[in-house]
Image (cartoon, grey):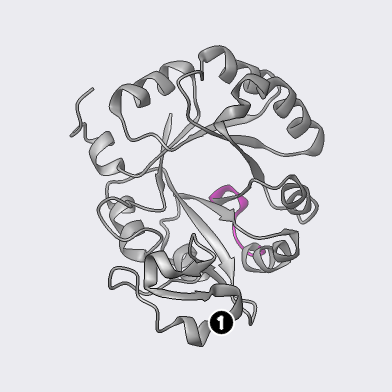
Amino acid sequence: MKWIAHRGCSRAAPENTLAAFDLAWRIPVDGVELDVRTTSDGHAVVFHDADGARMAGDSRRIAELTLAELAAWRVGGEPVPTLEEVLAHAPSQSLTLIELKEGRDQVAIIAEILKNMNATCYRLLSFDPAVAMAAVKAGIPVWLNVEASYTRMLGKVAGWARDEGIEGISLGWSSELSAANVATAHDHGRVMAVWTVNNAREADAMRAAGVDYLMTDIPDMLIRRQVPV
């Protein structure tokens, strides 16, 4: 099982910042997950929320701001990075999971950024099947984000993903997730990732179930076993 730092090492540093990603890469983790939105002038920036109220104390929406205007924001003292900046900092062996928080119209922006990169180094994530299919058409490897409530429907989801050329499924953790569920995804040839696990016992259970990638906010603590099982 490979370890993915969810929004970076996001319990130890401000989420989705270079500081959080740098901490994760130094552990090291196998990859990081991040969220992407686009500015009004078409730049991809790493930020989870639609506006800055929670993280930057500014209620304006990212889609309404230019990159230059966004440069004034600070998240726990850290600037908001662009996707290009994070990818440029990432170690060559690290996987970057890019969750696109917006619609399929933004896929072209991401595709332009990724066009000269080795495709083994990234995957696009989305909850929106239309975005996932647009990414496939753009030649971007994609995993479909799926809520935990769909655990019992993984066979249907995995079959659809296979038919649409979607490489993997990124499933929300639940206590119902079993080795049989994971095997169902694997039987359809799909990669299985699970988010977000911050408990050692649950992490061990996911490894035993055959999960391929596990996302956590505390990779520093889980990988080094600084939390109780």
Task: Give x and y (percent) for residue 118.
Answer: 59, 55
Q: Residue furthest top?
A: 180
Task: Give x and y (percent) for residue 134.
Answer: 78, 53
Q: Quadrant of residue 218?
A: top left
Q: Residue furthest bottom?
A: 68
Circle 1 residue: 65
Viewer-proximal residue among 52 and 74: 52
Give the residue at x 54% y 51%.
121
- In magenta, the rendered stretch is 115-121
Please say if 160 is above or below 58.
Answer: above
Q: Is residue 139 magenta?
A: no
Viewer-proximal residue among 126 and 110: 126
Indicate the amino acid at tag 1.
Answer: Leu
Q: Quadrant of residue 98?
A: bottom right
Quadrant for the N terminus, please: top left
Left or right: residue 62 versus residue 94 is right
Please say if 149 is above or below 74.
Answer: above
Left or right: residue 208 versus residue 151 is left
Q: Is residue 120 magenta?
A: yes
Task: Give x and y (percent) for residue 127.
Answer: 64, 45
Viewer-proximal residue among 224 and 201: 201
